[in-house]
Image (spheres, coloured by chain):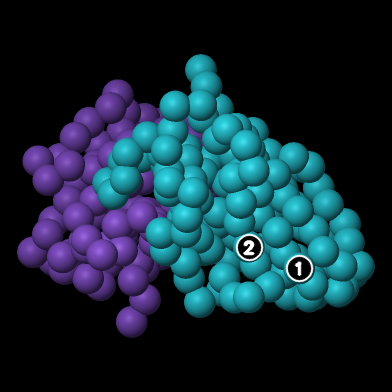
Chain colours: A purple, B cyan
Amino acid sequence: RKEVEQDPGPFNVPEGATVAFNCTYSNSASQSFFWYRQDCRKEPKLLMSVYSSGNEDGRFTAQLNRASQYISLLIRDSKLSDSATYLCVVIPPKGNFNKFYFGSGTKLNVKP
Amino acid sequence: EPEVTQTPSHQVTQMGQEVILRCVPISNHLYFYWYRQILGQKVEFLVSFYNNEISEKSEIFDDQFSVERPDGSNFTLKIRSTKLEDSAMYFCASSNRRGTDTQYFGPGTRLTVL
């Protein structure tokens, strides 16, 4: 089983739509979670950390469900500039604390 | 805003040749990483480096790979004898603390092995 799994998409949505992505992880003791976005042929850029209590940053909301081992990202009022690949990142338990495990990414296309 | 820089942006080499990819991490960061991304695939961890030594490496990081921090600012990845399958985007990253801290990525070096 892969450490981190994401639906590759693409998700094709109109401007203004609300869209949600999920990501599942295999190691229940994983300790930290992030969402990064990656534009075509560019580096991953931090979108937001994911806290146990859930967190919101403007139009973006991230949630963690430890019982079901998934994290989610909700984007409200989608903009054309939100078109990108969204990468789920998990840090495994202590002992492997230095490396990020990346999901394969979920591609989002926001259309006018 | 401080950022990670990488040079060159694109490197083309012949199979069997040695390449050195260079990175300048964010200046007050202490933890350094290399990742690679083969075209169309996910980002994969290669190695992490702290206090002038490797702290963890993946199974990809075999004897053909090495890392070095030759001075106070640069962090390099060397591939001794490149293979076709080494063609990928190589990202350097750095973080201020270990463990759960955010990693900041450089723009990457696209390596093409012919």
Give the structural element (helix, strand or loop) at label 1.
Answer: loop
Q: Position of residue B40 (x, y in %)?
A: 63, 64
Residue at x-position 22% and y-position 70%:
A27
Label 1 neighbour load within 10 Å: few <14, some 14-19, many 20+:
some
How far apart are labels 1 and 2 at the CA level?
Answer: 8 Å
According to the image, label 1 marks what residue? Answer: B80
According to the image, label 2 marks what residue? Answer: B66
Amino acid residing under circle 1: Arg
Q: In this rendering, do the residues under marks 1 and 2 share a single chain?
A: yes
Residue at x-position 63% and y-position 62%:
B66
Side of B90 relative to B50 (left or right): right
Q: Position of residue A41 (x, y in %)?
A: 67, 47
- Front residue (pair A50, A22): A50
On what subunit does the disc labeled 2 rest? B
* Vertical arrangement, residue A2 with respect to residue B4, above or below: below
Q: Position of residue A11 (x, y in %)?
A: 46, 53
- Front residue (pair B104, A37): B104
Which of the two labelled residues, at mark 1 and mark 2, occupies the earlier sequence position? 2
Residue at x-position 22% and y-position 63%:
A93
Location of residue A61 (image quadrant)? top left
- Front residue (pair A58, B81): B81
Give the structural element (helix, strand or loop) at label 2.
Answer: strand
Direction top: furthest residue? B1
Amino acid residing under circle 2: Ser
